[in-house]
Image (cartoon, coloured by chain):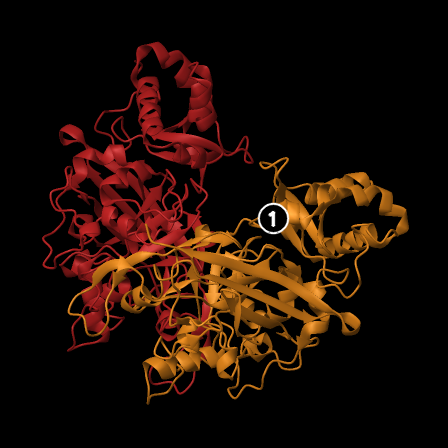
Chain colours: A red, B orange
């Protein structure tokens, strides 16, 4: 292969042959035409065009020649496996090179769009370190975890319509703010704009209403993962959230990475979850599961380019399989495009926390950045970027890409 | 007109000319073909067929010849007004009778479907009587309302994917239950299955992310109303809801009525909301609004056919315009098909409460039904039906139809 071929990608590249994440892109030449693509090295394979050029089956071509991932999501795991095998062959087999090479678009020339139409969005609270640190900040001296925390993965529904793709600016939200010292709430732009570095799980195969998805069937329904930044306005949230939970403190924007990494690409990242000290109810019992449902994914959070945290997903108390089993245990149905996120990923060490509220102890201990600036919470113009990698086969690493967003001033 | 014509509908019928609610139906002859319909007397106007038969414009025909309300929802208020005028003419003008009469389908022969694709679903908590009664039941002796209650309409996101049309059976959900007396949670079918009689508001015209919808612009975005039964598993809810709000206690099913009554049909139902004793922030200030945003809608709740409550929507503290202004004040966007519900509609008198938890004081004072049975919460096989009417022009009444559901045993 010519060394300058777009198909000449080292097998240990973050977007190499072991990864093959899916996204939706357009080009400057055809800005209105959204296409399914697969990231490979520095290029994107135009998946629909490649299917046609390689003479793929009509079924497979229809799934890939689509403006969003949703048809492929709905098709289910046996089809996901076939499609992944076909993509691998197209990108690596000599026989396909002439057909595929012209269907590679430089990533630098492409615009990314939301990779799937979000059906329902659920956010969990699955990091013990995060939940306990938040408890210590707000309820010093009492039990840092709520009494239900170790019995069930706490979650709530968020706003699907305000999930945006990485790169979308985030307008500082306005709303009601009240500190305990204020006699009454005031109105204005949030003074405590925060991030939450999370992993998101994209549901593919649906399930019917009135039935549940057993923990052992999670991989039949979960298609893949993305990175999530669950932007949070802490002053709005703290005033509104009793008794029905977060609402406007979260619903203004949730950013996701443009590339959905298939669960199949994370086989080498499977690890045992941390030891639990509370007996789970049978529907949440994942002891002995092979492969285990923990994921050794290393996140990095950058604020204006400066690395401020390295949250380890392997430290999460609850796994995605437990989250999905819990989400459906009451008979709630799944739809293709459902997104459930882990909640803030935080580790045990201070610089492994995935939200500013923890990193700065609710703003009391601002971060000192290498450029001489300090941050308790986000200022207008700040840019936050979350990246992640995971082990791939044979010492390689898989990239999850990035989710990035810059804060715009309130209107 | 022949007295047996499907167009011979008295002007004071609940589904008369002043109402014209929209729904989606199919017939036994073509069970797979979902069509937009307008309820009129005992019939449904096949709206797409009528548009074609009357030679309506291509734009209007495209909006009505659709399998859901969503295209019409997205079109915005000026189009809604034109469509309503056209429907009125088709159903009442002699010149259209020959074209329209054959497009009337008996309601008894039709199957109703979900009238619109639900985008995001938000549930509010807008009845002071409901919130205060629940507070008295669970926190006797302390302030029955949370401190934020009179400053903002409390709300949270629910699961859009489990919104179902009236008539869909509701499977008793399973989940984690724990009473304060239990040392640890148990698993099983809910023992405290409840209803919440609510009004739902269907969003039509979208709004962009990062901007807000002013209270005075609410009617540009709200298309119409439906009835909602927000089924609730109180034992699951009470164990899970601190700190992130209701989740599995609600997400198994939410039922809506098949007919969406246009806001235009409720002009005669507009009333002043009740007096408020807390100064609202300017974005929620509806004092002096003309017409006012209160709605004099009378609900009735029946359990196994027995009338058990008459909740008055006119008693709601927060109006739909305030709910919408609050929902978007942080820049959250609106999409066609967004549904926001009022929360339980309860009045000040015991038999005007819209949930069993209030009607039976958390099960302690069971309802005695006329058939000799007693109910604290719902039993398998129970059927709950919520109906409602509102004043129409010149002494007529507008019907909102019904939302009904029967409880099936847990799997």
Mark 1, chain letter?
B
Q: Residue at x 74, y 42 (%)?
A: B61
Residue B342 pos. (x, y %): 52, 69
State the residue in front, B152 or B99. B99
State the residue in front, A10 or B280. B280
Q: Residue at x 49, y 64 (%)?
A: B304
Quarter of the figure with residue A86: top left
Residue B286 pos. (x, y %): 61, 78
* Residue B47 horizontal side relative to residue A311, left or right: right
* Residue B224 horizontal side relative to residue B396, left or right: left
Residue B398 visible somewhere in the drawing: yes
* Residue B155 horizontal side relative to residue B339, left or right: left
State the residue in front, B139 or A219. B139
Mark 1 highlights which residue? B70
Which residue extends farthest top? A95
State the residue in front, B401 or A278. B401
């Amino acid at each position: 292969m010519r060394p300058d071929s777009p198909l000449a990608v080292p097998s240990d590249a973050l977007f190499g042959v072991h990864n093959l994440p899916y996204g939706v892109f357009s080009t400057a030449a055809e800005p209105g035409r959204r296409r399914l693509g697969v990231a490979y090295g520095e290029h994107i394979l135009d998946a629909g065009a490649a299917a046609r050029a390689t003479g793929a089956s009509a079924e497979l071509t229809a799934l890939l020649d689509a403006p969003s991932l949703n048809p492929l999501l709905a098709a289910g795991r046996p089809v996901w496996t076939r499609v992944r095998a076909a993509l691998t062959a197209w990108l690596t087999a000599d026989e396909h090179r002439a057909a595929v090479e012209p269907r590679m678009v430089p990533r630098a020339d492409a615009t990314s769009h939301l990779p799937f139409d979000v059906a329902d969005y659920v956010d969990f609270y699955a990091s013990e370190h995060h939940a306990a640190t938040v408890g210590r900040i707000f309820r010093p001296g009492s039990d840092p975890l709520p009494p239900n925390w170790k019995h069930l993965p706490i979650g709530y529904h968020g706003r699907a319509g305000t999930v945006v793709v990485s790169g979308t600016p985030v307008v500082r939200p306005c709303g009601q703010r009240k500190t305990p010292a204020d006699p009454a709430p005031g109105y204005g732009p949030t003074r405590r704009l925060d991030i939450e570095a999370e992993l998101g799980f994209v549901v593919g195969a649906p399930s019917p209403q009135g039935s549940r998805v057993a923990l052992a069937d999670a991989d039949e329904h979960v298609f893949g993962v993305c990175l999530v930044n669950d932007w949070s306005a802490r002053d709005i949230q703290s005033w509104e959230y009793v008794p029905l939970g977060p609402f406007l403190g979260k619903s203004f924007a949730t950013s996701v990475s443009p590339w959905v990494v298939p669960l199949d690409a994370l086989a080498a990242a499977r690890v045992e979850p941390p030891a639990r000290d509370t007996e789970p109810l049978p529907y949440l019992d994942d002891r002995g599961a092979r492969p285990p449902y923990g994921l050794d994914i290393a996140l990095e959070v950058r604020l204006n380019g400066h690395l401020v945290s390295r949250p380890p997903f392997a430290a999460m108390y609850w796994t995605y399989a437990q989250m999905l089993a819990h989400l459906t245990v009451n008979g709630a149905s799944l739809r293709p495009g459902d997104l459930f996120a882990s909640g803030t990923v935080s580790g045990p060490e201070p610089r492994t926390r995935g939200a500013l509220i923890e990193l700065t102890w609710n703003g009391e201990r601002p971060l000192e950045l290498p450029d001489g600036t300090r941050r308790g919470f986000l200022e207008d113009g700040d840019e936050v970027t979350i990246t992640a990698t995971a082990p791939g086969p044979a010492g390689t690493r898989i990239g999850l890409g990035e989710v990035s967003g810059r804060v715009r001033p309130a209107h």
